[in-house]
Amino acid sequence: MTTSAVLLHEVARCRAGDKGDDSILVLSPRQRERLDLLAAVLDPAAVAAHFGGMSADDVEILVLASL
Amino acid sequence: MTASRRLGAGAGFAGDRLDPAVDLVQRGALDALVFECLAERTITLAHQARAEGRGPGYDGLLRERLAATLPAARRHGTLVVTNSGAADPRGAAQMVRDLAVELTLSDTVVASVEGDDVLDRLSLPDSPVLGSRSGATLADYAGRIVGANAYLGVRGICDALAAGAHVVITGRTSDAALFLGPLLHWFGWADDDLDRVADGTLVGHLLECAGQLTGGYFADGSPDDVPGLARLGFPMADVTADGSAEFSKLPGTGGRLDRATTLEQLLYEVGDPAAYLTPDVTLDVTGVQITETGPDRVRVHGARGTAAPDTLKVSVGVRDGWQGVGEISYAGPHALARGRLAAQVVTERWSDVHGLDDVPLRADLVGIDSCRPWAQLPAAEPPEVRVRLAVRSPEERPAVLLAREVEALYTNGPAGGGGVVTSVRPTLGLVSTTIDRREVEPVVTVFS
């Protein structure tokens, strides 16, 4: 099996907003079939690591497959 | 066929462009034009300005917005709804009424909606600060509170429209309620018809940021991402009595309105998509369907609603000390090294000369490490850097010193610094609490 790396922004868009002190990042796949991949890869630890080592406990992820 | 009503978004924030709203009201055959101009920061600034006698307590651009749009709105029978009243909706309504007379539109009825200012009703020790991990209450901010405004729902707007208002001016109201109000007024939806209220709230949520639905905040650098971005058209929605809505923009305007832009706006700043709390309904958008029905046209439906919370969110503005900022640029060979040296010089003097170790100094190299300090540096030497040094302090003195230190880099720092900009200003902070909704009643005043 071969694997290849892809950059996140190549497979998804992101819109950032906030509610109080919380940042809300809406990540939407450019192709619907990529949703499962995003959901599998982007766990709280990965998101926390992307933002410079913040605590994964401070990251909450909601997957909205219905949308 | 069910008659529809058309709502237009005239502004998504206090400083938004004026020309898209003028275009909408002139060509859009709107039934209502809504200016959403009141971020939590904005109302706090309005409270502060009014308290210090530096201006009205309402949006300083309100007169200009209405002067440019009211004649066409009255000509076309378009209602105008806005939260630009900020800290003084009644003063704003009186100003707009006077403006209408100036514009020979003397039959214009203007109404203000107040009741959101709840500062005198809050028990500070009994008001927990939302999100505080230390258990803080508003008592911890005693003496620094500038204003406290509860998020009103739709009722005051509906009452104002029932009283015959052509223009309704509120203070702190949920953004979506500005759009929901006319819908309840036109269609006779009951406050407790929660699915219809949810539909109308969804319409408001999608429109409230104006150009963000039509391609603003979307382009990823290519001019092709959003055609005609410089002439971005603002959105409008045709809503029917069954709650379904079709969103579009005017022909000939720039922008992009499709499933992708709508989906991003649907979830924008929504903490829990299954339970988005508003004063009028708890909104569930997880079952929403977005369908492209034509070029720059989408149909949206499927919102669900449950009862609104028993409490209303209260936004509380607090004085939060002083901020000093100084910036300076370096360009050419070793620009990055000189920028770093400049920051080092100020940091060293901050401690050794001024003894301000207890006032943290922030140093950023804009374009290098200011937004993502954890990111890997580019291998190539940047052609230029902009050094930004900033400090926040309860006292004004450190902010002033910081500004002076950056300016002094001209002749006392690394070679070739230029373009110094400094600022020293008081800062305002925001915290939130809640209030029992039974303690908050909208107050409508009609000017005619």
Image (cartoon, rainbow, N blue to C red):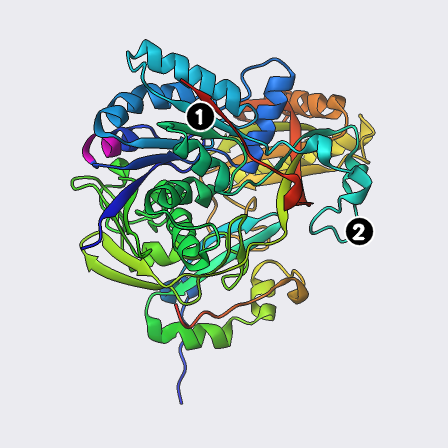
Asked where in the image residue B321 lies, by quadrant, the reply is: top right
> Where, quadrant-wise, is the N terminus of chain B in this rendering?
bottom left
Residue nearer the viewer, A67 or A35 = A67
What crowding class fits label 2: few (fewer than 14 Cα within 10 Å), some (14-19), or many (20 or more)? Answer: few
Q: Secondary structure at mark 1?
A: strand
For marks 1 and 2, give the CA distance: 42 Å
What is the chain letter for disc 1?
Answer: B
Counting from the top left corner in percent of width and height, residue A57 is at 67, 66
- Does residue B425 appear left or right of residue B34 in this picture? right
Task: Work out whether disc 1 and disc 2 sit on a shared chain.
Answer: yes
Which residue is rendered at x = 19% and y = 33% of the image?
B27
Residue that numbered label 2 is attached to: B134
- Residue B68 in view in this figure: yes
Q: Are marks 1 and 2 in contact (CB under 8 Å)?
A: no
Which residue is rendered at x = 29% and y = 24% of the image?
B69
What crowding class fits label 1: few (fewer than 14 Cα within 10 Å), some (14-19), or many (20 or more)? Answer: many
> Where, quadrant-wise, is the C terminus of chain B in this rendering?
top left
Residue type at mark 2?
Answer: Ser
> What's drawn in magenta, residue-wise?
B23-27
Which residue is rendered at x = 32% and y = 14% of the image?
B106
Would you place residue B114 above or below residue B260 in this image?
Answer: above
Residue type at mark 1?
Answer: Ala
Counting from the top left corner in percent of width and height, residue B189 is at 39, 50
Would you place residue B244 above or below residue B228 in this image?
Answer: below
Residue that numbered label 1 is attached to: B111
Residue B72 covered by magenta stretch: no
Asked where in the image residue B338 lies, by quadrant, the reply is: top right
Counting from the top left corner in percent of width and height, residue B383 is at 44, 39
